[in-house]
Amino acid sequence: MHSELDITTIAIDAMGGDHGPAVTVPAAIEFLKNVNAQSHAVILVGREEQINDLVTAHNGDPFVANGALKVHAASEVVEMDESPALALKRKKDSSMRVAINLVKQGVAQAAVSAGNTGALMATARFVLKTISGVDRPAIISTMPCQDTSQTVHMLDLGANVDSSPEMLVQFAVMGSVLTEFVDKKAHPKVGLLNVGAEEIKGSEKVKKASVLLSDSELNYVGYVESDELFSGKVDVIVCDGFEGNVALKASEGTAKMIFNVLSEEFKRNIITKMAGALCMPIFKAMQARLDPRLHNGATLIGLNGIVVKSHGGTDQLGFLHAIQEANRQAELNVIGHISEEISKVFSKQNQ
């Protein structure tokens, strides 16, 4: 048994998502295979018998024996179409809530769930509360970029559908801090999603947010149009949750369509014994850009704790990426840095 000192522990809602334990359990075991199990631990939260059977089936028993993998019982499951309010009120022993409770109690440094997004947001906000100075948490995730060596963070992706200009500034601060500490980018460039690049364009809300961002100490570079989302022009794209969710879903749908078409084209017309050897590196690079599983794991940022939302329909590879994202943020103490930067911004505004 290893010591619990200096161990990064991830609590996983094992029952959440379209596929539940069939995806979450093997992904958790794969995560532990790829890290130092002496300094990392995973807690699978849910129905014990079902989880234990899958742990054994996927050769996870050695991790149970050395304490790197634990199972925590939870008797209830939040369904994907369940009302967030009812889930919060009636299912206090759901795998989702128990996983978040473990973060609140300090047992785990982060929680990961592929479950109902609305219920996850409501439960996380109720249990963990928001960082001082943050009105509402936002959903942030990485977006694919034309240059695969770059990453772009975008928020809000659907948590708040009517954000004020002040909230957009808060999103910008949180996205900038996360990008700086997770991606190691000093003074990340921040852009505001708008219908045009000219100052006269956009809603009054966006225009006011632009003025506030220009007066801040962030590296704000101005407006970003929707055709520049993947250009790498900025490191952080800020928007209202309505626009962000529309942009995200449109991007995912387009990427899937292009990837599937190109995949079939390669199979039918390009990949031969000779041409395949030449084209496969290009195809793999394209896959890294377009495969949404490789960008899975959206953070509920602005909470007093790390909560990562996985796409509900993802597979083992996609959920593994969500766990890895939670682990990176936990190891880098992203929450602490965000709290510090938010405090600086508000103290200067009040001077």
Image (cartoon, rainbow, N blue to C red):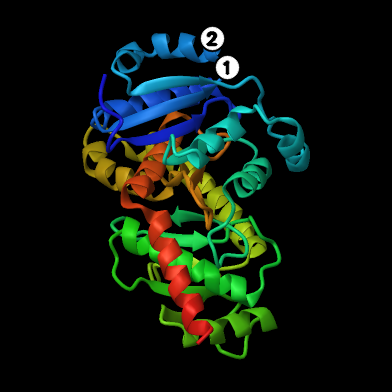
The picture places residue 219, in percent across and down from the top left corner, at 39, 79
- Residue type of the residue flagged with mark 2: Glu
Compared with 310, 246 (above or below) is below
Q: Is residue 343 left or right of residue 134?
A: left
Label 2 neighbourhood size at 10 Å, few (<14), some (14-19), many (20+)?
few
Q: Residue at x 35, y 15 (%)?
A: 64
The picture places residue 237, in percent across and down from the top left corner, at 49, 68
Q: Residue at x 62, y 65 (%)?
A: 135
Residue 288 visible? The answer is no
Residue 276 visible? The answer is yes
- Residue type of the residue flagged with mark 1: Arg
Q: How far, Cα to Cα, is label 1 from label 2?
A: 6 Å
Decide which of 32, 102 is in the foreground and name it.
102
* Residue 76 numbered tag: none
Residue with the mark numbered 1:
47
Q: Residue at x 69, y 30 (%)?
A: 79
Q: Residue furthest bottom?
A: 200
The picture places residue 70, in percent across and down from the top left corner, at 41, 21
Q: Quadrant of residue 123?
A: top right
SS at badge 1: loop
Q: Is residue 127 left or right of residue 342?
A: right
Do residues under tags 1 and 2 come within 8 Å of each other at their CB atoms?
Answer: yes
Label 1 neighbourhood size at 10 Å, few (<14), some (14-19), many (20+)?
many
Compared with 339, 141 (above or below) is above
The picture places residue 294, in percent across and down from the top left corner, at 40, 43
Decide which of 37, 313 is in the foreground and name it.
37
Decide which of 307, 239 is in the foreground and name it.
307
* Residue 49 numbered tag: 2
Q: Quadrant of residue 320?
A: top left
